[in-house]
Image: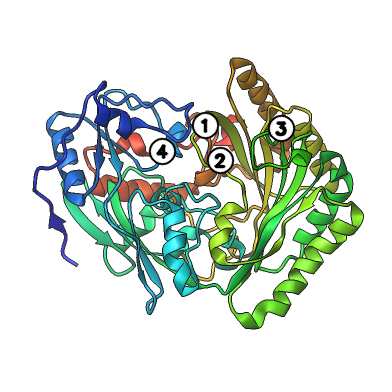
Amino acid sequence: MTPTTITQPIAILAEPGETSYADAVASFNLDAHLEPALAVVATTPGEVADAIREARERGLRVRTQSTGHAAKTASSMRGDALIRTRIAGPVVIDPDLKTAHIPAGTLWGAVVEAAAPYRLVAIHGSSPTVGAIGFLLRGGLSFYGRKFGVSANSVRSITITLASGVSVVTSDENQPELFWALRGGGGGFGVVTDIEVQLYDMYEVITGAAFWPAADAAVIAPLWRAWTETAPLEATTNLRVMNLPPVPGIPAVLTAGPVLVLDGAIAVAAAAEEDASQAILDALLNPLLEAAPPLMNTWTRALPSTLPQTHMDPREPIPGIGDHLLLTDLDDEALMHIITLAAQDTTLAVFELRQLGGRFAEPLRPGGAFDRTPAKFLYLGAGAIFSEDARVSIDTRLSVLREYLHRWDTGYTAPTFVENFGDPQRTLSDADGARVARIRLAMDPMGMFAGDVSPVRDTLTEG
């Protein structure tokens, strides 16, 4: 496909104080404060190209965001121009090819809804309010991931506007090196305006959450960890300690103190798999329910469109901080120790261990720069900061957890789970990082998008 240069002048970069500026810099994490010199919400590829051109003429670097979920992972934008992509247009499903065309700025909830009538699914995130494009460009670890792999491996093409104003459709056949680097390479190549992804047949899912008092972790957690050793690829689960707020919609029995939560999904691709999927659920859940009666258990068969509700991610913007590691393994003693640490401070909203392995570690075929992780578990800790006292308390608890988990730290992180720009983070090997840097230099020799490059702060050398 021949690259095209978009020339029509449409977008106008707004300055601080203007309504359109405030819209462009809004963040889902209210603790992130973006302060670019100029900003614009771009609704067409033409507006993207025009904004890049105007920034270049003013001698400004260009920064990008879509939904703002990853805003705290960005370096300072002062003196830069911010393009927020909100490309107009629907998600387009091709049921014959089993693909979805997703405009930049689209939320995962819209993708799930568009694919649902065809009993097809994307390898989507756990929250319906997260932007699909940013998730896919950073790799993405889905509830379907142990069966289908890192979400970026399902990307079939990426349309990007480069610093020159040229729009290029990249794929395995066109600009394959750029296509490889865009999928998990750390950004800084241009402004992505749409992505096409492969969809997969999904008859139904078995999903839900079981809740116990945190004190029951002593019997529940070791049973879950033992199950993960031989868990089938169809199942991806999380073990969490949560402090749920007393708000409408949450049963009072779950808000009296820290609760231990097991949630996740079992993929049922076809009706013929119903019996096998029930056997997976029974092997997972029955020993836990027999060991300790739950406060509540919502695991059930459901349509795939219900899966984004399982993880109970926040629906509205909140101020928050968190931390993340990819772990080699944990024994029962370590598992109980960190769960106890997590449950000691109620200002920590969530402590999570996500089950990895399967196709996360061994993809069916190579993908982009970040196409696999050998880690066995993903750790995430986070809290909402509605006061400075809460910030200090959460920071302290996260530091204690990180220090204890250091011995199992792989030294690598999953990009979609990195919480703060200054945190230790590394996605790629030195060789792959050097390859990405060469591709980035070829695409953006003047460094117009250099501010969007994810840093490498290696825990192996800095910890």
Residue drawn at 64 percent across, 83 percent down: 272
Q: In this view, does 167 lie above or below 419?
A: below
Residue 401: assigned label: 3
State which mark lies toward you, 2 or 3.
2
Task: Judge from the rendering whether residue 4 lies leftward or rightward of residue 286; answer left or right.
Answer: left
* Front residue (pair 428, 260): 260
Q: In this view, does 69 lie above or below 238?
A: above
Element assignment for label 2: loop
Q: Where is residue 87 shown, x and y percent of the image? A: 27, 50
Q: Label 4 to label 1, Cα distance in Å?
A: 12 Å
Q: Label 2 to label 4, Cα distance in Å?
A: 14 Å
State which mark lies toward you, 3 or 4.
4
Residue furthest to the front: 248
Q: Mark 2 points at which residue?
A: 314
Determine the image quadrant of residue 265: bottom right
Residue 148: assigned label: none
The answer to the question of whether label 3 and label 4 lie on touching residues, with beta carbons closer than 8 A, is no
Residue drawn at 60 percent across, 71 percent down: 204
In the rendered image, which quarter contains the C terminus? top right
Q: Where is residue 259 shown, x and y percent of the image? A: 77, 40
